[in-house]
């Protein structure tokens, strides 16, 4: 059994999708904890309702990023994680924290990386006239929204898309892609070499949505 610790900051819909897939598909894993930097994160209630331990490490209680990250790492390590999953966790992480979990920490970012790291990705894709948008699951490296790509989901950008409509269509694909990518990790199906991630049985790492 692999231990997965999921980090959230808000709604937690990707976390829900992972919790549900782990149970219904009977992964060789358990969600050991859901940890948030905000006590108000809606996803905490869902996790608790599923009997998953929850914890809050409030970043506002710390003077420096280093102090916050050190406490966050201590709390996460208490659950003996094989994998840390960032699911809408909206904090910039220090290099020390990232190195501590290197090779066992995944993130989902709502763009086709390396395009549009950072915030407001869907609005920026629309303004740039992109015809494709999407989301990326990647291993976390010290560079923000950067790291070996595990999977990407792409959707067309429609002529009348708004930030809200595009993000809703991308999110639907995130809920398919992220559980799949996490499952690959816990099954030991991923190879990471020279900065590239491949699936050992050749499963498609590209999802095309509508
Ligand atoms: C998701 O769209 C995720 O891709 C994005 O935040 C949303 C969280 O939604 N992540 C980032 O922007 C990370 N930089 P959720 O809380 O419902 O899963």
Image (cartoon, grey):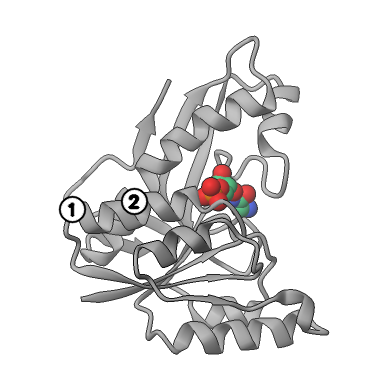
Q: Is residue 194 visible?
A: no
Residue 156 placement (x, y as % from top left) = 51, 20
Q: Nearer the viewer, residue 131 or 90?
A: 90
Q: Check contact, mark 2 vs mark 1: CB within 8 A.
A: yes
Give the residue at mark 1. Answer: 25
Give the residue at x 30% y 63%.
185
Q: Nearer the viewer, residue 89 or 24?
A: 24
Q: Secondary structure at mark 1?
A: loop
Q: Is residue 18 left or right of residue 35?
A: left
Work out whether mark 2 precedes mark 1 in sequence or the reverse, and give the earlier one: 1
Q: Quadrant of residue 142?
A: bottom right
Q: Is 73 situated above or below 137?
A: below
Q: Nearer the viewer, residue 177 or 141?
A: 177
Residue 195 placement (x, y as % from top left) = 45, 60
Q: Is residue 119 visible?
A: yes
In the picture, the quarter occupied by the C terminus is: top left
Number of the front mark, 2 or 1: 1
Crowding near the residue tagged with mark 2, few <14, some 14–19, many ≥20 C-alpha atoms within 10 Å: many
Give the residue at mark 2. Answer: 179
């Amino acid at each position: 059994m692999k231990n997965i610790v999921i980090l959230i900051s808000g709604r937690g819909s990707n976390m829900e999708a992972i919790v549900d897939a782990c149970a219904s598909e009977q992964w060789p894993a358990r969600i050991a904890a859901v940890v948030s930097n905000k006590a108000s994160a809606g996803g905490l209630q869902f996790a608790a309702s599923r009997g998953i331990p929850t914890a809050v490490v409030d970043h506002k209680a710390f003077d420096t990023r280093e102090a916050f990250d050190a406490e966050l790492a201590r709390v996460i390590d208490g659950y003996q994680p094989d994998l840390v999953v960032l699911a809408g966790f909206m904090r910039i992480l220090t290099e020390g924290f990232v190195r501590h979990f290197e090779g066992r920490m995944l993130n989902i970012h709502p763009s086709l990386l390396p395009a549009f790291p950072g915030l407001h990705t869907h609005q920026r894709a629309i303004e740039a006239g992109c015809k494709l948008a999407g989301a990326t699951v990647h291993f976390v490296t010290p560079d923000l929204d950067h790291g070996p790509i595990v999977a990407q989901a792409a959707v067309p950008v429609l002529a009348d898309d708004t930030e809200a409509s595009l993000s809703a269509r991308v999110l639907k694909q995130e809920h398919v892609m992220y559980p799949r990518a996490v499952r690959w990790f816990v099954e030991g199906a991923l190879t990471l070499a020279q900065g590239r991630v491949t699936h050992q049985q050749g499963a498609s790492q590209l999802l095309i949505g509508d």
